Image: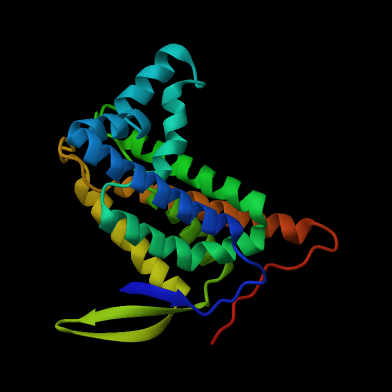
Amino acid sequence: MIPLRDANPTRRTPVVTIGLVVACLVAFAWELGLQVTGGNEALDAFITQWGVVPADLTSAWSTGGIVTPETLTLITMQFLHGGWLHLLGNLLFLWIFANNIEDDLGRLAFLLFYLGGGVAAGLTQVAIDPTSTVPMIGASGAIAAVLGGYIVLYPRARITSLVFLGFFYQLIDVPAIVVLGFWFVLQLIDGLASLGLSSADGGVAFFAHIGGFVAGLVAARLLIVLRRRRPGARPPDVAPVG
């Protein structure tokens, strides 16, 4: 099931979402430039420097405190990608779901929500495999936080999805709670299946997805609670059913 678009209009231009898309594209162009000019060695060195290396992060925190260059990689890794498929897949989900969260939270709050979700995602993966020396990169953890927020704020929003049925496919409109719930269950299954396996050759950081999703879900639930307690506050937005 691949989401293609949602029937959930926004009230204003998603400036931050567009900025995040552009930032990821620019960072990927920089990676391609490094690979062309310096080869794979230059690219690998760049990824190792700006991606999250769990062993380096835990070592830095155990000896030098929280404010370290390694801590910064929890942010920088969110803009790096390992290939075209990795990049375009993440940007598709970002473009479909992030604009509504930005519209609801406001631009600055959304940026903090997005980056904070990415940090929570990275820390979750580090907690699962703190001795790994494989760099972790990608926006998927932060985007998972967006998905967690979306499923809370807009569970009934209709998502046009590409569904494969053997050799055939069909476009159908599915509630967000089904599309994103299915996605999360897949991450849980794959994450549990990956426990105990060697990560020497890299792979998908499923627990970053899980951690980011849960962080976004919890943050959105807290937002709803705070809005209900604030006198005169508007109720949470209700997504269109059709």
Q: Tell whether 24 sits left or right of 135.
A: right
Q: Quadrant of residue 185?
A: bottom left
Residue 22 % position (x, y): 47, 54
Residue 178 % position (x, y): 41, 74
Q: Tell whether 21 sits left or right of 35.
A: right
Asked if 69 appears above or below 225 in the picture, the reply is: above
The front one of 222 and 9 is 9
Q: Which residue lies furthest to the top in this view?
A: 63
The front one of 52 and 20 is 20
| Badge count | 0
Q: In which quarter of the image is the C terminus?
A: bottom right
Asked if 11 appears above or below 65 in the picture, the reply is: below
Residue 47 in sight:
yes
The front one of 24 and 73 is 24
Residue found at x 33% / y 85%: 171
Residue found at x 50% / y 52%: 20
Residue found at x 77% / y 57%: 229
Q: Which residue lies furthest to the front in this view?
A: 37
Residue 129 % position (x, y): 28, 34
Residue 134 in sight:
no
Q: In which quarter of the image is residue 173?
A: bottom left
Residue 45 % position (x, y): 26, 29
Colour pattern: rainbow
Q: In which quarter of the image is the N terminus?
A: bottom left
Residue found at x 28% / y 37%: 34
